[in-house]
Image (spheres, rainbow, N blue to C red):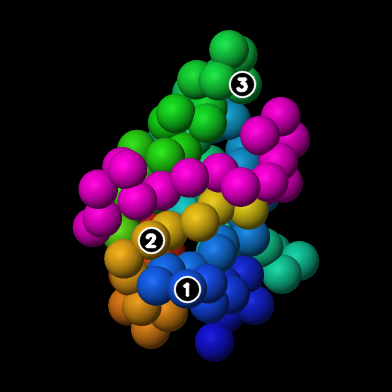
């Protein structure tokens, strides 16, 4: 199991480090026990948080309503809860996204 994933009810928690204002949206992989996610959105007025929710929902194939930031709303280090997905499926889809970069 990836160190940045944690089971939670009928979903998973993802521990991540967000890098806003990047040149493109992508997942770089694991760094210091967290998933490193780059987004083009700026960290202004919640734009990066909204972009993160949309990006993770698309990457994991779940509705945006299944994605919520549970810790780190105003920080680069965040914990995001993804509902309605198994730990194995989340890990598989994230690994696919890392390979696509």
Above or below for 48 versus 65 = above
On screen, residue 68 above or below 73: below
Name the residue carrying label 2.
83
Q: Residues within 10 Å of mark 3 (few under 14, many from 20)?
A: some
Mark 1 in CB contact with mark 2 (< 8 angstroms): yes
- Could you say where residue 100 lies in the image, as x and y percent from the top left? 32, 61
Q: Is residue 77 left or right of residue 1?
A: right
Which quarter of the figure has residue 59?
Answer: bottom left
The residue at which mark 3 appears reads as 43
Disc 2, SS: loop
Mark 3–mark 2 distance (CA, rounded to whole Å): 25 Å
Frontmost residue, 23 versus 59: 59
> Where does the magenta region start and end?
61-78
Label 3 vs label 2, nearer the camera:
2
**Which residue corresponds to the image point at 23% horizontal and 57% vertical from the top-left?**
61
Within the magenta stretch, is there residue 71?
Answer: yes
Q: Which residue ends up furthest to the front in the rendered image?
A: 9
Q: Residue 83's spot in the image, x, y percent?
A: 38, 61
Q: In terms of sequence position, does the residue under pointer 1 or pointer 2 come before the other?
A: 1
Q: CA distance from mark 3 to mark 1?
A: 30 Å
Query: Given this view, does label 1 or label 2 mark the residue nearer the observer?
Result: 1
Task: Specify whether residue 23 is in view.
Answer: no
User: How much space separates mark 1 and mark 2, taking CA atoms?
Assistant: 8 Å
| Residue at left offset 58%, top offset 75% | 6
**Residue designated by label 1:** 9
- On whether residue 46 falls in the magenta region, the answer is no
């Amino acid at each position: 199991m990836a160190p940045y994933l944690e089971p939670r009810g009928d979903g998973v928690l993802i521990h991540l480090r967000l890098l806003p204002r990047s040149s493109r949206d992508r997942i770089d992989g694991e760094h210091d026990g967290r998933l490193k996610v780059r987004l083009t959105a700026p960290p202004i007025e919640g734009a990066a948080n909204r972009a993160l929710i949309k990006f993770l929902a698309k990457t994991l194939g779940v509705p945006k309503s299944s994605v919520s930031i549970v810790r780190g709303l105003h920080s680069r280090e965040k914990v995001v809860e993804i509902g309605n997905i198994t730990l194995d499926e989340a890990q598989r889809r994230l690994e696919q996204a890392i390979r696509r970069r």
